[in-house]
Amino acid sequence: MTNDTDIARTFDIRVKEWAGYTPDGSDALYSQSAIVTSRPVITVPAGQTAVMRLFVMRAGMKYIMDDYRVLVTDITPDMVSDGKSQVMSKTNLVLPMFVFNKDMAIFHAKLTLADGKLCNSGTMFARVKGWKTQSGQNVDRLHYLFPGETGNCMNVPGVTSVADVRYDDETQ
């Protein structure tokens, strides 16, 4: 991490398991113990660079890839000068992190369609690019369906067959 400001900055670094999106479209983040940071709180001096490492603490994952989000939150106290607060720009980042499991033999997405919902019961994420409705309309929409999560489905109105869905899973 590089601090290009003229004051020391302090950051809180957390890693959460990412399970796709909630019904309202926000990230579904959960506590986890598989990934730890070398420095969960780090202070970077003005004009300096500091290294923070992430460590995988477990072996044998369920899927080809586990999905995480690295949350970087600037917790530097606001500066006060002569009893008046100064406005400070704060850095808050959410960085995607994917940990691949190279021990699994075969990875693939397996899409199923029921009642207008498309789900992935495979072992690899599916990158849905769009679909064709029963009336012939082409819908372009990028969406990721993660493996084995029956709750992580997407609505595909007007679709009657998985064959009408354009997707890939990095193996095609």
Image (cartoon, rainbow, N blue to C red):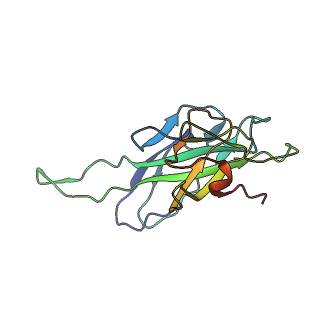
Residue 93 in which image quadrant: bottom left
x 41%, y 68%: residue:
4
Q: Is residue 121 above or below residue 54?
A: above
Left or right: residue 166 compared with residue 15: right
The spot of residue 39 in percent (x, y) is: 56, 44
The spot of residue 105 in percent (x, y) is: 88, 44
Left or right: residue 26 compared with residue 29: left
Q: Nearer the viewer, residue 18 or 4?
A: 18
Q: Is residue 1 visible?
A: no
x 11%, y 54%: residue:
82
Q: Is residue 109 above or below residue 57?
A: below
Q: Nearer the viewer, residue 8 or 118?
A: 118
Q: Nearer the viewer, residue 98 or 27?
A: 27
Q: Is residue 9 above or below residue 153?
A: below
Image mark count: 0
The spot of residue 141 in percent (x, y) is: 51, 59
Q: Nearer the viewer, residue 74 or 169?
A: 169
Left or right: residue 72 compared with residue 68: left
The furthest residue to the left? 83
Q: Is residue 138 above or below residue 79?
A: below
The spot of residue 88 in percent (x, y) is: 26, 58
- Quarter in which the C terminus is drawn: bottom right
The furthest residue to the right? 105
Q: Is residue 18 visible?
A: yes
